[in-house]
Image: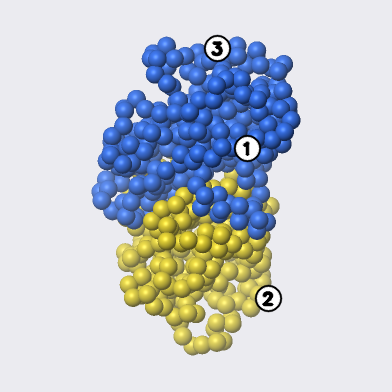
Chain colours: A yellow, B blue
Protein backbone atom coordinates (compact mmCIF):
# COMPACT_ATOMS: atom_id res chain seq x y z
CA UNK A 1 0.00 0.00 0.00
CA UNK A 2 1.35 3.38 -0.91
CA UNK A 3 1.91 6.14 1.59
CA UNK A 4 -0.87 8.32 0.18
CA UNK A 5 -3.36 5.49 0.37
CA UNK A 6 -2.23 4.70 3.91
CA UNK A 7 -2.60 8.36 4.88
CA UNK A 8 -6.08 8.46 3.40
CA UNK A 9 -7.28 5.39 5.28
CA UNK A 10 -5.67 6.45 8.56
CA UNK A 11 -7.35 9.86 8.35
CA UNK A 12 -10.70 8.18 7.67
CA UNK A 13 -10.19 5.98 10.72
CA UNK A 14 -9.27 8.92 12.90
CA UNK A 15 -12.41 10.68 11.68
CA UNK A 16 -14.42 7.93 13.43
CA UNK A 17 -16.15 7.22 10.13
CA UNK A 18 -14.98 3.64 9.62
CA UNK A 19 -16.13 0.28 10.88
CA UNK A 20 -14.43 -3.09 10.49
CA UNK A 21 -11.77 -1.86 8.04
CA UNK A 22 -8.71 -4.09 8.33
CA UNK A 23 -9.50 -7.58 7.06
CA UNK A 24 -9.58 -8.61 3.39
CA UNK A 25 -13.29 -7.95 3.44
CA UNK A 26 -15.94 -6.87 5.91
CA UNK A 27 -18.63 -9.04 7.49
CA UNK A 28 -22.17 -7.72 7.25
CA UNK A 29 -24.95 -10.03 8.39
CA UNK A 30 -24.53 -13.30 6.49
CA UNK A 31 -22.19 -11.78 3.93
CA UNK A 32 -18.53 -10.94 3.50
CA UNK A 33 -17.94 -7.96 1.20
CA UNK A 34 -14.69 -7.08 -0.59
CA UNK A 35 -13.96 -4.39 -3.17
CA UNK A 36 -11.09 -4.07 -5.62
CA UNK A 37 -10.54 -1.39 -8.24
CA UNK A 38 -8.64 -1.97 -11.46
CA UNK A 39 -7.54 1.04 -13.49
CA UNK A 40 -6.00 1.06 -16.93
CA UNK A 41 -2.49 2.48 -16.82
CA UNK A 42 -2.17 1.80 -13.10
CA UNK A 43 -2.95 -1.90 -12.73
CA UNK A 44 -2.79 -2.96 -16.35
CA UNK A 45 -2.37 -1.91 -19.95
CA UNK A 46 -4.79 -3.05 -22.59
CA UNK A 47 -1.89 -3.62 -25.00
CA UNK A 48 -0.77 -6.58 -22.88
CA UNK A 49 -3.19 -8.90 -24.49
CA UNK A 50 -6.69 -10.22 -24.36
CA UNK A 51 -9.39 -8.53 -22.32
CA UNK A 52 -10.51 -11.99 -21.16
CA UNK A 53 -7.21 -12.74 -19.39
CA UNK A 54 -7.06 -9.25 -17.95
CA UNK A 55 -10.58 -9.36 -16.55
CA UNK A 56 -10.20 -12.92 -15.28
CA UNK A 57 -7.11 -11.90 -13.31
CA UNK A 58 -9.10 -9.12 -11.64
CA UNK A 59 -11.87 -11.56 -10.75
CA UNK A 60 -9.29 -13.93 -9.21
CA UNK A 61 -7.73 -11.16 -7.12
CA UNK A 62 -11.11 -10.20 -5.74
CA UNK A 63 -12.36 -13.78 -5.31
CA UNK A 64 -9.28 -14.60 -3.22
CA UNK A 65 -10.26 -11.88 -0.72
CA UNK A 66 -13.63 -13.54 -0.20
CA UNK A 67 -12.17 -17.04 0.17
CA UNK A 68 -9.56 -15.60 2.56
CA UNK A 69 -12.40 -14.81 4.95
CA UNK A 70 -13.93 -18.26 4.57
CA UNK A 71 -16.91 -17.20 2.49
CA UNK A 72 -18.35 -18.47 -0.79
CA UNK A 73 -18.49 -15.77 -3.49
CA UNK A 74 -22.13 -15.26 -4.55
CA UNK A 75 -22.87 -11.76 -5.86
CA UNK A 76 -21.09 -9.07 -7.78
CA UNK A 77 -21.56 -5.32 -8.06
CA UNK A 78 -19.78 -4.12 -11.17
CA UNK A 79 -18.78 -0.50 -11.68
CA UNK A 80 -17.42 -0.02 -15.14
CA UNK A 81 -16.05 2.82 -17.22
CA UNK A 82 -16.14 1.73 -20.87
CA UNK A 83 -13.57 3.62 -22.93
CA UNK A 84 -14.95 5.38 -26.00
CA UNK A 85 -12.61 3.45 -28.30
CA UNK A 86 -14.09 0.09 -27.31
CA UNK A 87 -16.87 0.04 -29.88
CA UNK A 88 -18.09 -3.46 -29.09
CA UNK A 89 -19.61 -3.10 -25.63
CA UNK A 90 -21.55 -6.33 -26.16
CA UNK A 91 -18.25 -8.19 -26.38
CA UNK A 92 -17.11 -6.59 -23.12
CA UNK A 93 -20.41 -7.48 -21.46
CA UNK A 94 -20.06 -11.06 -22.64
CA UNK A 95 -16.65 -11.35 -20.97
CA UNK A 96 -18.06 -10.12 -17.65
CA UNK A 97 -21.06 -12.45 -18.00
CA UNK A 98 -18.83 -15.40 -18.76
CA UNK A 99 -16.57 -14.67 -15.78
CA UNK A 100 -19.56 -14.31 -13.47
CA UNK A 101 -20.94 -17.65 -14.65
CA UNK A 102 -17.53 -19.35 -14.45
CA UNK A 103 -17.05 -18.30 -10.83
CA UNK A 104 -20.65 -18.84 -9.70
CA UNK A 105 -21.52 -15.17 -9.34
CA UNK A 106 -24.70 -13.25 -10.07
CA UNK A 107 -24.27 -9.61 -11.07
CA UNK A 108 -26.77 -7.72 -8.91
CA UNK A 109 -25.97 -4.12 -9.67
CA UNK A 110 -23.37 -1.46 -10.21
CA UNK A 111 -22.95 1.48 -12.51
CA UNK A 112 -21.79 1.83 -16.10
CA UNK A 113 -20.36 4.97 -17.63
CA UNK A 114 -18.57 5.86 -20.82
CA UNK A 115 -15.20 7.58 -20.46
CA UNK A 116 -11.60 7.68 -21.59
CA UNK A 117 -10.05 4.55 -20.12
CA UNK A 118 -11.06 1.07 -19.04
CA UNK A 119 -11.62 1.27 -15.31
CA UNK A 120 -13.67 -1.10 -13.26
CA UNK A 121 -14.22 -2.07 -9.70
CA UNK A 122 -15.58 -5.35 -8.48
CA UNK A 123 -17.46 -5.61 -5.20
CA UNK A 124 -17.98 -9.23 -4.30
CA UNK A 125 -20.42 -10.47 -1.70
CA UNK A 126 -19.76 -13.92 -0.31
CA UNK A 127 -21.92 -16.14 1.86
CA UNK A 128 -20.19 -16.41 5.22
CA UNK A 129 -19.11 -19.86 6.34
CA UNK A 130 -20.00 -21.16 9.80
CA UNK A 131 -16.56 -20.12 11.01
CA UNK A 132 -15.23 -16.73 10.00
CA UNK A 133 -11.52 -16.35 9.30
CA UNK A 134 -9.91 -13.12 10.43
CA UNK A 135 -6.49 -11.57 10.98
CA UNK A 136 -6.87 -11.59 14.72
CA UNK A 137 -6.70 -14.51 17.14
CA UNK A 138 -3.05 -15.54 16.71
CA UNK A 139 -1.42 -16.75 19.95
CA UNK A 140 2.26 -17.09 20.89
CA UNK A 141 3.67 -20.41 19.57
CA UNK A 142 1.26 -20.51 16.62
CA UNK A 143 2.91 -21.41 13.33
CA UNK A 144 2.89 -19.10 10.30
CA UNK A 145 2.73 -20.74 6.89
CA UNK A 146 2.09 -20.23 3.20
CA UNK A 147 1.36 -22.71 0.42
CA UNK A 148 3.46 -23.97 -2.45
CA UNK A 149 1.69 -25.73 -5.32
CA UNK A 150 3.55 -29.01 -5.93
CA UNK A 151 2.81 -28.89 -9.64
CA UNK A 152 4.99 -25.80 -9.87
CA UNK A 153 7.66 -27.19 -7.50
CA UNK A 154 8.03 -30.31 -9.63
CA UNK A 155 7.93 -28.39 -12.83
CA UNK A 156 10.96 -26.20 -12.48
CA UNK A 157 13.76 -25.34 -10.11
CA UNK A 158 13.07 -21.64 -10.55
CA UNK A 159 12.05 -19.55 -7.57
CA UNK A 160 8.29 -19.83 -7.34
CA UNK A 161 7.57 -16.58 -5.58
CA UNK A 162 8.71 -13.00 -5.86
CA UNK A 163 8.71 -12.70 -9.62
CA UNK A 164 5.20 -11.36 -10.01
CA UNK A 165 5.89 -7.79 -9.01
CA UNK A 166 8.94 -7.70 -11.31
CA UNK A 167 6.81 -9.03 -14.16
CA UNK A 168 4.16 -6.40 -13.44
CA UNK A 169 6.73 -3.60 -13.39
CA UNK A 170 8.31 -4.78 -16.61
CA UNK A 171 4.88 -5.10 -18.20
CA UNK A 172 3.90 -1.56 -17.16
CA UNK A 173 7.18 -0.13 -18.46
CA UNK A 174 7.91 -2.21 -21.55
CA UNK A 175 4.68 -4.08 -22.23
CA UNK A 176 6.25 -7.55 -22.01
CA UNK A 177 6.03 -10.29 -19.40
CA UNK A 178 6.37 -14.08 -19.33
CA UNK A 179 3.05 -15.58 -20.38
CA UNK A 180 3.10 -18.05 -17.48
CA UNK A 181 3.63 -15.33 -14.86
CA UNK A 182 1.26 -15.66 -11.96
CA UNK A 183 0.83 -11.91 -11.91
CA UNK A 184 -1.18 -12.29 -15.11
CA UNK A 185 -3.21 -15.20 -13.79
CA UNK A 186 -3.01 -15.90 -10.06
CA UNK A 187 -3.61 -19.47 -8.99
CA UNK A 188 -6.65 -19.97 -6.83
CA UNK A 189 -7.52 -23.22 -5.03
CA UNK A 190 -10.88 -22.51 -3.37
CA UNK A 191 -11.49 -26.07 -2.14
CA UNK A 192 -8.14 -26.27 -0.38
CA UNK A 193 -8.48 -22.78 1.07
CA UNK A 194 -11.98 -23.48 2.39
CA UNK A 195 -10.72 -26.73 3.98
CA UNK A 196 -7.72 -25.05 5.62
CA UNK A 197 -9.76 -22.05 6.76
CA UNK A 198 -11.75 -24.28 9.09
CA UNK A 199 -8.70 -25.42 11.06
CA UNK A 200 -6.65 -22.21 10.87
CA UNK A 201 -6.40 -19.84 13.80
CA UNK A 202 -6.15 -16.81 11.53
CA UNK A 203 -5.58 -16.12 7.87
CA UNK A 204 -5.32 -13.47 5.21
CA UNK A 205 -4.61 -12.89 1.58
CA UNK A 206 -1.02 -11.81 0.89
CA UNK A 207 -1.44 -8.73 -1.28
CA UNK A 208 1.42 -6.45 -0.34
CA UNK A 209 4.17 -8.98 0.45
CA UNK A 210 4.69 -11.29 3.44
CA UNK A 211 6.77 -8.86 5.49
CA UNK A 212 4.17 -6.09 5.28
CA UNK A 213 1.37 -8.54 6.07
CA UNK A 214 3.37 -9.89 9.05
CA UNK A 215 3.74 -6.38 10.41
CA UNK A 216 -0.04 -5.99 10.16
CA UNK A 217 -0.62 -9.31 11.95
CA UNK A 218 1.91 -8.32 14.63
CA UNK A 219 0.10 -5.07 15.32
CA UNK A 220 -3.39 -6.59 15.44
CA UNK A 221 -2.36 -9.58 17.55
CA UNK A 222 0.33 -7.85 19.64
CA UNK A 223 2.91 -10.50 18.77
CA UNK A 224 6.39 -10.89 17.29
CA UNK A 225 7.87 -13.69 15.16
CA UNK A 226 10.76 -16.13 15.25
CA UNK A 227 11.76 -17.07 11.71
CA UNK A 228 12.24 -20.78 11.11
CA UNK A 229 13.46 -20.42 7.53
CA UNK A 230 15.95 -18.08 5.97
CA UNK A 231 14.06 -14.90 5.02
CA UNK A 232 13.55 -14.96 1.30
CA UNK A 233 13.60 -11.92 -0.91
CA UNK A 234 10.10 -12.63 -2.13
CA UNK A 235 8.82 -11.91 1.37
CA UNK A 236 9.01 -8.27 0.30
CA UNK A 237 7.09 -8.87 -2.86
CA UNK A 238 3.47 -7.93 -3.49
CA UNK A 239 1.31 -9.34 -6.31
CA UNK A 240 1.57 -12.90 -4.99
CA UNK A 241 -2.08 -13.57 -4.04
CA UNK A 242 -1.33 -16.33 -1.60
CA UNK A 243 -2.92 -17.29 1.68
CA UNK A 244 -0.95 -16.55 4.82
CA UNK A 245 -2.10 -18.77 7.69
CA UNK A 246 -1.54 -19.10 11.40
CA UNK A 247 -2.14 -22.57 12.89
CA UNK A 248 -2.12 -23.66 16.49
CA UNK A 249 0.62 -26.27 17.21
CA UNK A 250 -2.11 -28.89 17.67
CA UNK A 251 -3.54 -28.34 14.20
CA UNK A 252 -0.31 -28.07 12.24
CA UNK A 253 0.06 -31.69 11.16
CA UNK A 254 -3.60 -31.85 10.12
CA UNK A 255 -3.08 -28.70 8.05
CA UNK A 256 0.00 -30.22 6.38
CA UNK A 257 -1.92 -33.39 5.51
CA UNK A 258 -4.79 -31.36 4.10
CA UNK A 259 -2.48 -29.26 1.90
CA UNK A 260 -0.85 -32.48 0.74
CA UNK A 261 -4.21 -33.87 -0.33
CA UNK A 262 -4.59 -30.84 -2.58
CA UNK A 263 -1.07 -31.34 -3.97
CA UNK A 264 0.38 -28.42 -2.06
CA UNK A 265 3.23 -28.08 0.38
CA UNK A 266 2.47 -26.11 3.54
CA UNK A 267 5.62 -24.08 4.10
CA UNK A 268 5.97 -23.25 7.81
CA UNK A 269 8.35 -20.29 7.98
CA UNK A 270 7.81 -18.57 11.33
CA UNK A 271 6.41 -18.94 14.80
CA UNK A 272 4.53 -16.32 16.78
CA UNK A 273 6.02 -15.14 20.07
CA UNK A 274 5.26 -12.55 22.70
CA UNK A 275 6.65 -9.21 21.67
CA UNK A 276 6.45 -7.10 18.59
CA UNK A 277 7.71 -7.09 15.03
CA UNK A 278 9.32 -4.23 13.21
CA UNK A 279 9.21 -4.15 9.45
CA UNK A 280 12.47 -3.29 7.71
CA UNK A 281 11.15 -0.87 5.11
CA UNK A 282 11.48 -1.90 1.52
CA UNK A 283 8.44 -0.90 -0.42
CA UNK A 284 8.07 -2.62 -3.76
CA UNK A 285 4.79 -0.98 -4.65
CA UNK A 286 5.77 0.94 -7.79
CA UNK B 1 -28.99 6.06 -19.72
CA UNK B 2 -26.89 6.10 -22.81
CA UNK B 3 -27.22 3.56 -25.57
CA UNK B 4 -23.83 1.98 -24.89
CA UNK B 5 -24.63 1.55 -21.21
CA UNK B 6 -28.03 0.09 -22.12
CA UNK B 7 -26.42 -2.30 -24.57
CA UNK B 8 -23.92 -3.39 -21.95
CA UNK B 9 -26.58 -4.12 -19.34
CA UNK B 10 -28.90 -5.86 -21.80
CA UNK B 11 -26.06 -8.12 -22.92
CA UNK B 12 -25.25 -8.95 -19.28
CA UNK B 13 -28.90 -9.82 -18.70
CA UNK B 14 -29.05 -12.00 -21.78
CA UNK B 15 -25.92 -13.77 -20.56
CA UNK B 16 -27.97 -15.01 -17.59
CA UNK B 17 -25.40 -13.47 -15.26
CA UNK B 18 -27.62 -10.93 -13.51
CA UNK B 19 -30.04 -11.07 -10.63
CA UNK B 20 -32.42 -8.38 -9.43
CA UNK B 21 -31.06 -5.65 -11.69
CA UNK B 22 -33.82 -3.10 -12.35
CA UNK B 23 -34.67 -1.24 -9.15
CA UNK B 24 -32.69 1.67 -7.72
CA UNK B 25 -30.86 -0.83 -5.57
CA UNK B 26 -30.88 -4.54 -4.93
CA UNK B 27 -32.20 -6.31 -1.84
CA UNK B 28 -29.83 -8.80 -0.23
CA UNK B 29 -30.90 -10.24 3.10
CA UNK B 30 -31.68 -7.32 5.40
CA UNK B 31 -29.90 -4.82 3.19
CA UNK B 32 -30.56 -2.70 0.12
CA UNK B 33 -27.42 -2.02 -1.93
CA UNK B 34 -26.93 0.77 -4.47
CA UNK B 35 -23.80 1.84 -6.36
CA UNK B 36 -23.03 5.10 -8.16
CA UNK B 37 -19.82 6.09 -9.90
CA UNK B 38 -18.65 9.69 -10.25
CA UNK B 39 -15.89 10.47 -12.72
CA UNK B 40 -14.06 13.73 -13.16
CA UNK B 41 -14.70 15.14 -16.63
CA UNK B 42 -17.85 13.06 -17.06
CA UNK B 43 -19.99 13.88 -14.04
CA UNK B 44 -18.14 16.92 -12.75
CA UNK B 45 -15.15 19.20 -13.10
CA UNK B 46 -13.02 20.07 -10.14
CA UNK B 47 -12.81 23.67 -11.35
CA UNK B 48 -16.49 24.12 -10.48
CA UNK B 49 -15.73 24.78 -6.89
CA UNK B 50 -15.27 23.18 -3.55
CA UNK B 51 -14.63 19.47 -3.19
CA UNK B 52 -17.04 19.46 -0.25
CA UNK B 53 -20.03 20.50 -2.37
CA UNK B 54 -19.03 18.14 -5.14
CA UNK B 55 -18.69 15.13 -2.85
CA UNK B 56 -21.84 15.96 -0.91
CA UNK B 57 -23.85 16.02 -4.13
CA UNK B 58 -22.59 12.53 -4.95
CA UNK B 59 -23.56 11.30 -1.50
CA UNK B 60 -27.07 12.75 -1.95
CA UNK B 61 -27.53 11.09 -5.34
CA UNK B 62 -26.58 7.73 -3.90
CA UNK B 63 -28.52 8.19 -0.64
CA UNK B 64 -31.69 8.93 -2.59
CA UNK B 65 -31.44 5.48 -4.24
CA UNK B 66 -31.45 3.83 -0.84
CA UNK B 67 -34.36 5.90 0.50
CA UNK B 68 -36.23 5.21 -2.75
CA UNK B 69 -36.32 1.54 -1.76
CA UNK B 70 -37.48 2.34 1.78
CA UNK B 71 -34.21 1.58 3.50
CA UNK B 72 -32.07 3.51 5.99
CA UNK B 73 -28.52 4.16 4.72
CA UNK B 74 -26.03 2.52 7.10
CA UNK B 75 -22.76 1.52 5.46
CA UNK B 76 -20.52 2.77 2.70
CA UNK B 77 -17.91 1.10 0.50
CA UNK B 78 -15.72 3.79 -1.01
CA UNK B 79 -13.61 3.23 -4.10
CA UNK B 80 -11.43 6.21 -4.75
CA UNK B 81 -8.84 7.26 -7.28
CA UNK B 82 -6.88 10.18 -5.79
CA UNK B 83 -5.32 12.32 -8.52
CA UNK B 84 -1.58 12.87 -8.20
CA UNK B 85 -2.05 16.66 -8.10
CA UNK B 86 -4.14 16.51 -4.92
CA UNK B 87 -1.27 16.69 -2.46
CA UNK B 88 -3.42 16.88 0.65
CA UNK B 89 -5.02 13.44 0.86
CA UNK B 90 -5.80 14.01 4.52
CA UNK B 91 -8.06 16.88 3.54
CA UNK B 92 -9.85 14.64 1.04
CA UNK B 93 -10.22 11.91 3.66
CA UNK B 94 -11.66 14.45 6.09
CA UNK B 95 -14.35 15.42 3.60
CA UNK B 96 -15.40 11.80 3.11
CA UNK B 97 -15.34 11.23 6.89
CA UNK B 98 -17.44 14.32 7.50
CA UNK B 99 -20.01 13.29 4.86
CA UNK B 100 -20.22 9.79 6.29
CA UNK B 101 -20.84 11.18 9.77
CA UNK B 102 -23.33 13.78 8.51
CA UNK B 103 -25.45 11.12 6.79
CA UNK B 104 -25.14 8.45 9.48
CA UNK B 105 -22.86 6.13 7.49
CA UNK B 106 -19.94 3.96 8.54
CA UNK B 107 -17.26 3.38 5.90
CA UNK B 108 -16.67 -0.37 5.98
CA UNK B 109 -14.33 -0.90 3.06
CA UNK B 110 -13.40 -0.10 -0.49
CA UNK B 111 -10.21 0.49 -2.39
CA UNK B 112 -7.93 3.52 -2.77
CA UNK B 113 -5.56 4.08 -5.65
CA UNK B 114 -3.50 6.99 -6.93
CA UNK B 115 -4.06 7.99 -10.55
CA UNK B 116 -4.66 10.85 -12.94
CA UNK B 117 -8.15 12.07 -12.15
CA UNK B 118 -10.56 12.19 -9.25
CA UNK B 119 -12.84 9.21 -9.67
CA UNK B 120 -14.89 7.59 -6.98
CA UNK B 121 -17.74 5.22 -6.58
CA UNK B 122 -20.01 4.94 -3.60
CA UNK B 123 -21.72 1.68 -2.70
CA UNK B 124 -24.29 2.28 0.00
CA UNK B 125 -25.89 -0.43 2.09
CA UNK B 126 -29.17 0.44 3.73
CA UNK B 127 -31.14 -1.41 6.38
CA UNK B 128 -34.35 -2.58 4.74
CA UNK B 129 -37.59 -1.24 6.17
CA UNK B 130 -40.45 -3.60 7.06
CA UNK B 131 -42.06 -2.84 3.72
CA UNK B 132 -39.88 -2.79 0.64
CA UNK B 133 -40.63 -0.28 -2.10
CA UNK B 134 -40.15 -1.47 -5.66
CA UNK B 135 -40.96 -0.49 -9.20
CA UNK B 136 -43.46 -3.29 -9.62
CA UNK B 137 -46.95 -3.61 -8.17
CA UNK B 138 -48.70 -0.72 -9.95
CA UNK B 139 -52.33 -1.48 -10.87
CA UNK B 140 -54.64 0.20 -13.38
CA UNK B 141 -56.25 3.31 -11.85
CA UNK B 142 -53.28 3.98 -9.55
CA UNK B 143 -52.16 7.60 -9.49
CA UNK B 144 -48.67 8.69 -10.51
CA UNK B 145 -47.20 11.65 -8.64
CA UNK B 146 -44.03 13.60 -7.88
CA UNK B 147 -43.27 16.11 -5.15
CA UNK B 148 -42.81 19.86 -5.23
CA UNK B 149 -41.15 21.53 -2.23
CA UNK B 150 -43.39 24.44 -1.19
CA UNK B 151 -40.42 26.51 -0.08
CA UNK B 152 -39.30 26.66 -3.68
CA UNK B 153 -42.83 27.21 -5.00
CA UNK B 154 -43.29 30.22 -2.76
CA UNK B 155 -39.84 31.52 -3.42
CA UNK B 156 -39.99 32.19 -7.12
CA UNK B 157 -42.23 31.87 -10.12
CA UNK B 158 -39.46 30.19 -12.07
CA UNK B 159 -39.95 26.67 -13.34
CA UNK B 160 -38.80 24.36 -10.55
CA UNK B 161 -37.87 21.36 -12.63
CA UNK B 162 -36.02 20.74 -15.84
CA UNK B 163 -33.20 23.20 -15.35
CA UNK B 164 -30.74 20.84 -13.73
CA UNK B 165 -29.61 19.07 -16.85
CA UNK B 166 -29.12 22.41 -18.61
CA UNK B 167 -27.07 23.66 -15.68
CA UNK B 168 -24.97 20.50 -15.79
CA UNK B 169 -24.39 20.80 -19.52
CA UNK B 170 -23.44 24.45 -19.22
CA UNK B 171 -21.14 23.65 -16.31
CA UNK B 172 -19.40 20.86 -18.25
CA UNK B 173 -18.94 23.11 -21.29
CA UNK B 174 -18.29 26.54 -19.79
CA UNK B 175 -17.64 25.88 -16.12
CA UNK B 176 -20.47 28.11 -14.89
CA UNK B 177 -23.84 27.35 -13.32
CA UNK B 178 -26.26 29.09 -10.94
CA UNK B 179 -25.08 28.47 -7.38
CA UNK B 180 -28.60 27.53 -6.26
CA UNK B 181 -29.05 24.93 -8.97
CA UNK B 182 -30.34 21.67 -7.62
CA UNK B 183 -27.99 19.81 -9.93
CA UNK B 184 -25.17 20.97 -7.68
CA UNK B 185 -27.01 20.07 -4.51
CA UNK B 186 -30.13 17.92 -4.85
CA UNK B 187 -32.75 18.32 -2.15
CA UNK B 188 -33.37 15.23 -0.08
CA UNK B 189 -36.21 14.82 2.42
CA UNK B 190 -35.62 11.41 4.02
CA UNK B 191 -38.35 11.69 6.67
CA UNK B 192 -41.03 12.55 4.13
CA UNK B 193 -39.86 9.89 1.69
CA UNK B 194 -39.82 7.20 4.39
CA UNK B 195 -43.34 8.22 5.46
CA UNK B 196 -44.71 8.18 1.90
CA UNK B 197 -42.91 4.91 1.06
CA UNK B 198 -45.08 3.05 3.55
CA UNK B 199 -48.35 3.98 1.84
CA UNK B 200 -47.12 3.99 -1.76
CA UNK B 201 -47.86 1.10 -4.11
CA UNK B 202 -44.58 1.55 -5.96
CA UNK B 203 -41.85 4.12 -6.18
CA UNK B 204 -38.52 4.99 -7.68
CA UNK B 205 -35.90 7.67 -7.92
CA UNK B 206 -36.20 9.82 -11.04
CA UNK B 207 -32.68 9.76 -12.47
CA UNK B 208 -33.12 9.84 -16.23
CA UNK B 209 -36.26 12.00 -16.54
CA UNK B 210 -39.93 11.21 -15.88
CA UNK B 211 -40.75 10.01 -19.39
CA UNK B 212 -37.93 7.46 -19.43
CA UNK B 213 -38.84 6.28 -15.94
CA UNK B 214 -42.52 5.99 -16.95
CA UNK B 215 -41.54 3.79 -19.88
CA UNK B 216 -39.63 1.56 -17.44
CA UNK B 217 -42.63 1.38 -15.09
CA UNK B 218 -44.93 0.62 -18.03
CA UNK B 219 -42.77 -2.30 -19.12
CA UNK B 220 -42.38 -3.81 -15.65
CA UNK B 221 -46.04 -3.40 -14.70
CA UNK B 222 -47.54 -3.98 -18.16
CA UNK B 223 -49.52 -0.73 -17.99
CA UNK B 224 -50.09 2.50 -19.88
CA UNK B 225 -50.83 5.99 -18.62
CA UNK B 226 -53.50 8.68 -18.99
CA UNK B 227 -51.95 12.09 -18.40
CA UNK B 228 -53.91 14.36 -16.07
CA UNK B 229 -51.67 17.40 -16.53
CA UNK B 230 -50.18 18.98 -19.61
CA UNK B 231 -46.88 17.17 -20.27
CA UNK B 232 -44.11 19.47 -19.21
CA UNK B 233 -40.76 19.74 -20.93
CA UNK B 234 -38.95 18.79 -17.75
CA UNK B 235 -40.49 15.33 -17.98
CA UNK B 236 -37.64 14.66 -20.41
CA UNK B 237 -35.02 15.97 -18.06
CA UNK B 238 -32.58 13.88 -16.05
CA UNK B 239 -30.58 15.15 -13.05
CA UNK B 240 -33.72 15.89 -11.02
CA UNK B 241 -33.34 13.35 -8.20
CA UNK B 242 -36.99 13.26 -7.25
CA UNK B 243 -39.25 10.47 -6.08
CA UNK B 244 -41.78 9.15 -8.56
CA UNK B 245 -44.65 7.42 -6.75
CA UNK B 246 -47.69 5.33 -7.60
CA UNK B 247 -50.54 5.41 -5.07
CA UNK B 248 -53.73 3.38 -5.01
CA UNK B 249 -56.85 5.63 -5.25
CA UNK B 250 -57.65 4.79 -1.61
CA UNK B 251 -54.33 6.09 -0.34
CA UNK B 252 -54.07 9.25 -2.45
CA UNK B 253 -55.60 11.74 -0.03
CA UNK B 254 -53.51 10.36 2.84
CA UNK B 255 -50.40 10.76 0.70
CA UNK B 256 -51.36 14.36 -0.11
CA UNK B 257 -51.86 15.18 3.56
CA UNK B 258 -48.52 13.59 4.44
CA UNK B 259 -46.67 15.58 1.79
CA UNK B 260 -48.38 18.71 3.07
CA UNK B 261 -47.13 18.06 6.58
CA UNK B 262 -43.60 18.09 5.17
CA UNK B 263 -44.31 21.33 3.28
CA UNK B 264 -44.51 19.64 -0.08
CA UNK B 265 -47.15 19.50 -2.75
CA UNK B 266 -47.90 16.04 -4.15
CA UNK B 267 -48.35 16.67 -7.87
CA UNK B 268 -50.58 13.99 -9.36
CA UNK B 269 -49.90 14.01 -13.08
CA UNK B 270 -51.02 10.69 -14.53
CA UNK B 271 -53.12 7.62 -13.93
CA UNK B 272 -52.20 4.04 -14.76
CA UNK B 273 -54.38 2.16 -17.21
CA UNK B 274 -54.42 -1.21 -18.92
CA UNK B 275 -52.25 -1.10 -22.01
CA UNK B 276 -48.77 0.03 -22.77
CA UNK B 277 -46.76 3.23 -23.01
CA UNK B 278 -44.42 4.22 -25.78
CA UNK B 279 -41.71 6.72 -25.04
CA UNK B 280 -41.28 9.47 -27.61
CA UNK B 281 -37.47 9.44 -27.87
CA UNK B 282 -35.69 12.52 -26.71
CA UNK B 283 -32.53 11.65 -24.91
CA UNK B 284 -31.10 14.49 -22.86
CA UNK B 285 -28.22 12.49 -21.45
CA UNK B 286 -25.23 14.43 -22.89
| Residue position marked by numbered label 1 in the rendering | B278
Q: Please check whether the numbered discs 2 and 1 fall on a single chain.
A: no
Observer-nearest of B255 and A240? B255
The residue depicted at 62 percent of the width and 16 percent of the height is B255
Q: Is residue B246 above or below residue A87?
A: above
Check the picture and name the quadrant holding the C terminus of chain B: top left
Give the camera-side residue of B105 and B61.
B61
Q: Can residue A253 be seen in the rendering of this structure?
A: no
Is there one chain holding both mark 3 and mark 1? yes
Q: CA distance from mark 2 to mark 1?
A: 61 Å
- The residue where tag 2 is placed is A261
- Chain letter of mark 3 equals B
Q: Nearer the viewer, mark 3 or mark 2?
A: 3
User: Chain letter of disc 1?
Assistant: B
Q: Are marks 3 and 1 in contact (CB under 8 Å)?
A: no
Residue B180 horizontal/vertical position (percent): 34, 25
| Residue B260: mark in rendering | 3
Number of residues whose C-alpha sits closer than 10 Å to that of mark 1, classed few (under 14), some (14–19) or many (20 or more): some
Which secondary structure lies at badge 3? helix
Amino acid sequence: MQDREKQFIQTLKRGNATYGVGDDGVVLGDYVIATDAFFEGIHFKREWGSLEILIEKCFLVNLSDIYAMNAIPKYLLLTLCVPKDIKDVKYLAKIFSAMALKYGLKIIGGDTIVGEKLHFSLTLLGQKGKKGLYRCGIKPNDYLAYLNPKSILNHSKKQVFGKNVLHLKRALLFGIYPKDSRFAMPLLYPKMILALNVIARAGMDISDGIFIELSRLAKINKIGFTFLLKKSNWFYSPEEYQMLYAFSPYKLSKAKRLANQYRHQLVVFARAKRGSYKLVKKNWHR
